[in-house]
Image (cartoon, rainbow, N blue to C red):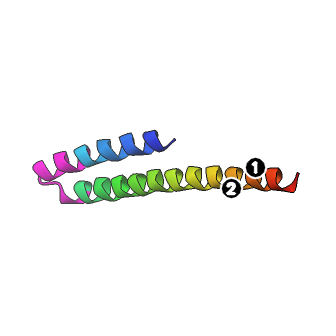
Amino acid sequence: MERVFQITALGLAAIAAYFLWRHNNDGAFIAAVLGCLSFFLSIRAQVKERNRLRSAEAEAEAGENSE
């Protein structure tokens, strides 16, 4: 899922650059904001996956120690 957000962020950055080139500041702003949102959602997906892996490791370690 994080790759989808990263690719979307890259595409929106390109769209924002195009809008700036065409002197459409409103469109560039909207595309840039959506690109930033997509980028931060990709970061959130990465952190969420890391936390899930850490909790699974901690549960596995706790299970080994209790035996």
Q: Position of residue 9 (x, y in %)?
A: 35, 47
Q: Secondary structure at mark 2?
A: helix
Which residue corresponds to mark 1?
Answer: 60
Relative to the observer, which residue lies in front, 7 or 53? 53
- Left of 32 or right of it: where is 20? left
Residue at 33 percent across and 59 percent down: it is 33
Please determine whether, in this image, residue 60 is positioned above or below residue 29: above
Tell me the kind of residue under disc 2: Ser
Q: What range of the chain is rendered magenta?
A: 15-26
Task: Choose top left, top right, bottom left or bottom right for residue 23.
Answer: bottom left
Q: Position of residue 61 (x, y in %)?
A: 74, 53
Relative to the observer, which residue lies in front, 1 or 23? 1
Which residue corresponds to mark 2?
Answer: 55
The answer to whether residue 10 is visible is yes
Please tell me the numbered disc located at residue 5.
none
- Left of 13 or right of it: where is 4? right
